[in-house]
Amino acid sequence: MTGSAASQPRRLAAFAVPSEPGNERLALAMVAEAVTGRGLTAARLERLKTAVAEAAMNAIEHGNHNQVEVPVEVEVLQSGTEIVVGISDSGGAAADASAEEPDLAEKLEGRQNPRGWGLFLIRNMVDALDVTTEGARHTVWLTMHTAASGAEGAGQ
Amino acid sequence: MKSACAARTRTIGAASVIELSGEVDGSAAETLTSAYQRATADGPARTIVLDFAAVDYINSTGIALIVSVLARARAERRAVAACGLSPHYREIFDITRLSDFIELYPDLDDVVSRLTGPAG
């Protein structure tokens, strides 16, 4: 996490969703509600929403293997000019299995699976992506700078 | 998971239009595949237009479905165009390079006039 040490993070929301396909939309909506009015432009809010949905989907499918009784936990923090969203599953380090870098030309020629865009989208949507693992707890941290930081073009 | 995606197909001039609505995610596979089959049922090579104006959500598995449609169309020597994308999803089409292979138009009127105009 890249939060400033100078300012104490403020928790905007903390919740859990069951690991059921489609619940990434629930996580997305709850994060969007939590960060509304916190300085993200509309375009950057859309980027964060896409990143949250993809990270939550990864947590549901690859981290918790669609086990409904194992929750995906979401925490939304604000620290200075940073919005930080943590999305945790119980997949441990295995959930970090590195995905092949997607190459559209290769996919169109059938040399890569058409899927495999999730992590790529996350990386391109947020200003910083960090991953922590503590035992089985695996957390993806998504950081977006608010408009006040003047980082509108960051993350490209 | 029940699909929240619907598709309507129609022919406009030389183009077969697939009008999508709702959510383009993994659950949309059957909807999109069936729509493509209807859109190409007449056989002759034509442009396939994907209209996203009524789509409010596309995720990575939806992108994969679009890649599959594009791959199939290219194998059948059909061009693919798209319209109605929000600025956010247009950005995602750029990031994924889909916009290198799919001609993008602001809306359906624009793409139809381009494809059915005197030069089309």
Image (cartoon, coloured by chain):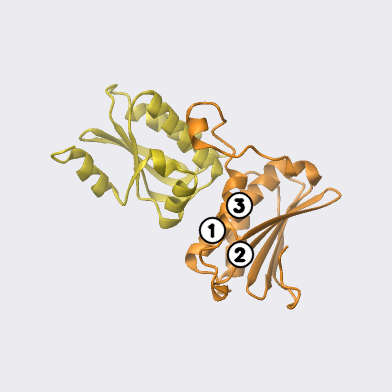
Chain colours: A orange, B yellow
Residue A28 appearing in the image: yes
Point 36% across, 23% down: residue: B76
Kindly identify which numbered label has been placed on residue A144. 2
Location of mark 3 (residue): A123
Looking at the picture, which amino acid does disc 1 mark? Arg
Q: Is residue A109 above or below residue A99?
A: above
Between disc 3 and disc 2, whose residue precedes?
A: 3
Between disc 3 and disc 1, whose residue precedes?
A: 1
Kindly identify which numbered label has been placed on residue A47. 1
Point 45% across, 47% down: residue: B93
Label 1 marks which chain's residue? Answer: A
Tell me residue B69's x, y (percent).
43, 32
> In the rendered image, which quarter contains the N terminus of chain A?
bottom right
Residue in the foreground of this view, choosing between B75 and A11: B75
Tell me residue B104's x, y (percent).
34, 46
Assess whether mark 2 and mark 1 are in contact (beta carbons under 8 angstroms).
yes
The local secondary structure at tag 1 comes to helix
Label 3 marks which chain's residue? Answer: A
Q: Residues within 10 Å of mark 3 (few under 14, many from 20)?
A: some
Between disc 1 and disc 2, whose residue precedes?
A: 1
- Kindly report the distance in space between the C-alpha atoms of the residues bearing marks 3 and 1: 10 Å
Label 2 marks which chain's residue? Answer: A
Q: Are marks 3 and 1 on the same chain?
A: yes
Point 44% across, 29% down: residue: B71
Looking at the picture, which amino acid does disc 3 mark? Arg
Q: Quadrant of residue A28?
A: bottom right
Q: Are marks 1 and 2 on the same chain?
A: yes
Q: Residues within 10 Å of mark 2 (few under 14, many from 20)?
A: many
